[in-house]
Image: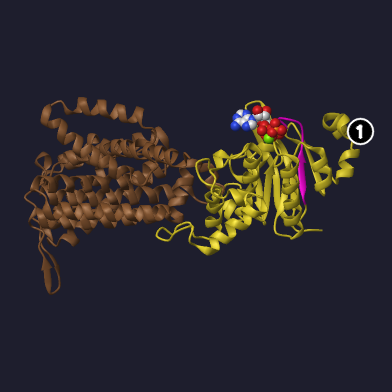
């Protein structure tokens, strides 16, 4: 029963997204791509935050590493989209292994502070290493090559074409993360969030699982960074800035930490609200902050969490 | 004589001026249900904490199956068969009972790293989890969140999680505290069964003297971090020293 509802919801969302891709204006296309990319970023992030219970303030670093990795690969090696995205995600994964190795030794505020510090380190690396990263100008003018599959090639130059590539990556990410949440590994992560000492007494080395969660979430951040770079065709060090690290935190909180679809709903809210508010005022942070307060105080468990509690109560009533 | 499973040599531990283990030397034999008793604050829980790796001793050695485990991390001791339950229910509050038991089951079956297959659709895992839940009498509540259980049922689950790790040596810290008579009987029956089957060697900390004397073949009495009595229940009951500092009128027939 519940599973069918999930399937129906997934198919509906997919239909809407395909519809947007076929019939929408460039502006709506662009916004929807931003939503999907932020969703990948936030869903991956939430494997660490909502699932494993580790609050990272440095995930923009992996987003940025993904973006720079993709840019560098397409400037110096090849522009095949699959290759450059793989390069970006792999670079992010590598950074996540190294940074995670140090961070998962600590928890709670110490973990959060360490990730913040490493994030700032990556930011200043990108800012200062001019010869490779272009310094404060960043890297720009990255072109999207065609996806050549041997005897034929799919062009993704135009936004209306690239849209479907982003949609494909989004769908694959959703599927993968859903699988992870249903899997033994996903259950162990929830166990670590609930009671890490008991998890240790089940015979599981908690640090290793924390590191694995860190790397998986960092890799999805890298994938989001790659897709974001190909969308904008440029990247600056601000992609790694700590204020960008706050985005997946806010998005997860808004949507609902311990829910699967929370980060997706949160991403829609984030992008759409920002777009709307920016039309009326330059002070978008102020208004966004107020709305965020209202959501966090008014919806326990985020928008998705609170709604599903309401629905349950409603359906249980005779 | 049964083979030695766990051996403790010159174990010491103090918290500031509170000595909780003073030159402890003893060994536990495979298949022998041992009770560890002593007044509040005697150091019983601390001893379990040290043996299972939650806290480090100040000095001394712990050997399990003849192997020095004094500095091994908790998880490795558990994988080698040394597990415990907690005095205060220490479960996964937001997870269902099924998931609570599945975590140790996945760990012992070495499936915990699989990340694309579904947990609930794995028939072997499901069978194993359900058999543990059945053992502790909570199979019907398999989908209930652990945090929503009654106190007694949480205590049952507490023991169930420890059993699911398939230990060869299991320390139970006051397993029946806070249980009603039905739950208590169920736990004791399980302990006897598993012990008779030769699967698990139990060491039990217990305050209820009826449980201690009916269940155990050996009783160790701790007082201020020292062993002041060790032997069969009868020997311990008869020991004047034990009577003096601990048992008092409780065993006076
Ligand atoms: N982490 C700790 N830090 C400081 N003191 C501790 C710590 N753990 C235990 N103690 C002290 O060590 C002594 C022994 O405690 P322990 O919990 O081992 O007793 P126990 O025999 O299990 O008692 P009870 O029957 O009440 O469970 C107590 O005085 C306690 O206050
Ligand atoms: Mg105790």
Position of B153 with respect to A303 (left or right) is right
Q: Nearer the viewer, residue A74 or A102?
A: A74
Which of the chains bears the disc numbered 1? B
Residue A254 appears at what percent x and percent y? Answer: 31, 36
Position of A85 with respect to B112 (left or right) is left
Image quadrant containing the N terminus of chain B: bottom right
Residue B12 appears at what percent x and percent y? Answer: 67, 37
Q: Residue at x 40, y 52 (%)?
A: A181
Position of A178 with respect to A278 (left or right) is right
The relative height of residue A123 versus residue A6 in the rendered view (above or below) is: above
Q: Residue at x 58, y 41 (%)?
A: B54
Q: Residue at x 36, y 53 (%)?
A: A6
The relative height of residue A133 versus residue A303 in the rendered view (above or below) is: below
Picture quadrant where residue A288 is located: top left
Crowding at label 1, few (<14), some or many (≥20) Cα neighbours within 10 Å?
few
Picture quadrant where residue B182 is located: top right
Position of A20 with respect to A5 (left or right) is left
Image quadrant containing the C terminus of chain B: top right
Residue A154 visible here: yes
Report if residue B92 lies within the magenta region: no
Instruction: Indicate the chain coloured yellow by its letter.
Output: B
Residue A140 appears at what percent x and percent y? Answer: 8, 47
Q: Residue at x 69, y 42 (%)?
A: B175
**Is disc 1's CB within 8 Å of ligand 1?**
no
Q: Nearer the viewer, residue B53 or A142?
A: A142
- Prevailing secondary structure of the magenta residues: loop
Q: Disc 1 designates what residue?
A: B252
Instruction: Indicate the chain coloured brown by its letter.
Output: A
Residue most extreme to the right:
B253
- Give the quadrant of ligand 2: top right
Q: Which residues are magenta?
A: B33-42
Residue A168 appears at what percent x and percent y? Answer: 22, 58
């Amino acid at each position: 029963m519940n599973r069918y509802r999930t399937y129906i919801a997934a198919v509906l969302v997919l239909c809407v997204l395909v519809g947007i891709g076929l019939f929408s204006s460039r502006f709506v296309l662009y916004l929807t791509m931003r939503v999907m990319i932020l969703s990948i970023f936030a869903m991956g992030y939430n494997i660490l935050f909502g699932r494993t219970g580790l609050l990272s303030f440095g995930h923009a670093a992996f987003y940025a590493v993904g973006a720079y990795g993709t840019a560098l690969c397409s400037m110096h090696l090849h522009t095949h989209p699959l290759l450059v995205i793989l390069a970006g995600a792999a670079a992010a994964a590598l950074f996540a292994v190294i940074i995670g190795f140090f961070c998962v030794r600590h928890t709670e505020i110490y973990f959060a502070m360490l990730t913040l510090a490493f994030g700032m380190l990556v930011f200043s690396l990108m800012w200062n290493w001019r010869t490779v990263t272009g310094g404060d100008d960043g890297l720009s003018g990255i072109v999207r090559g065609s996806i050549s599959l041997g005897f034929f090639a799919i062009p993704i130059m135009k936004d209306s074409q690239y849209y479907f590539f982003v949609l494909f990556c989004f769908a694959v990410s959703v599927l993968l993360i859903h699988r992870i949440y249903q899997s033994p590994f996903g259950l162990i992560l929830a166990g670590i969030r609930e009671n890490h000492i008991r998890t240790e007494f089940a015979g599981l080395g908690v640090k290793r699982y924390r590191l694995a969660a860190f790397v998986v979430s960092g890799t999805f951040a890298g994938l989001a960074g790659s897709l974001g770079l190909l969308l904008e065709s440029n990247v600056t060090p601000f992609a790694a800035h700590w204020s960008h690290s706050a985005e997946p935190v806010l998005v997860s909180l808004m949507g609902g930490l311990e829910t699967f679809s929370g980060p997706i709903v949160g991403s829609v809210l984030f992008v759409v609200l920002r777009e709307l508010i920016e039309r009326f005022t330059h002070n978008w942070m102020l208004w966004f902050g107020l709305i965020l307060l209202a959501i966090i105080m008014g919806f326990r468990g985020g928008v998705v969490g609170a709604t599903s509690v309401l629905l349950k109560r409603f359906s249980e009533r005779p | 004589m049964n083979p030695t499973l766990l051996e403790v040599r010159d174990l010491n531990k103090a918290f500031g001026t509170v000595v909780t283990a003073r030159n402890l030397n003893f060994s536990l034999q495979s298949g022998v249900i041992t009770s560890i008793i002593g007044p509040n604050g005697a150091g019983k829980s601390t001893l379990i904490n040290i043996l299972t790796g939650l806290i480090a001793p100040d000095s001394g050695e712990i050997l399990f199956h003849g192997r020095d485990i004094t500095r091994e991390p908790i998880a490795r001791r558990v994988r080698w068969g040394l597990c415990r339950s907690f005095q205060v229910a220490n479960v996964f509050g937001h997870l269902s009972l099924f998931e609570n038991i599945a975590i140790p089951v996945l760990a012992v079956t070495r499936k915990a790293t699989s990340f694309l297959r579904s947990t609930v659709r794995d028939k072997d895992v499901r069978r194993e989890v359900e058999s543990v839940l059945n053992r502790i009498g909570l199979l019907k509540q398999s989908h209930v969140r652990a945090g929503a259980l009654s106190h007694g049922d949480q205590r049952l689950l507490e023991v169930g999680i420890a059993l699911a790790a398939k230990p060869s040596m299991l320390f139970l810290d006051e397993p029946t505290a806070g249980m009603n008579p039905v739950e208590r009987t169920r736990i004791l029956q399980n302990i006897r069964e598993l012990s008779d089957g030769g699967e698990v060697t139990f060491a039990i900390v217990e305050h209820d003297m009826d449980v201690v004397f009916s269940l155990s073949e050996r009783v160790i009495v701790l007082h201020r971090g020292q062993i002041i009595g060790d032997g069969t229940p009868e020997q311990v009951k008869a020991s004047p020293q034990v009577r003096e500092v601990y048992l008092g009128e409780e065993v006076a027939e």
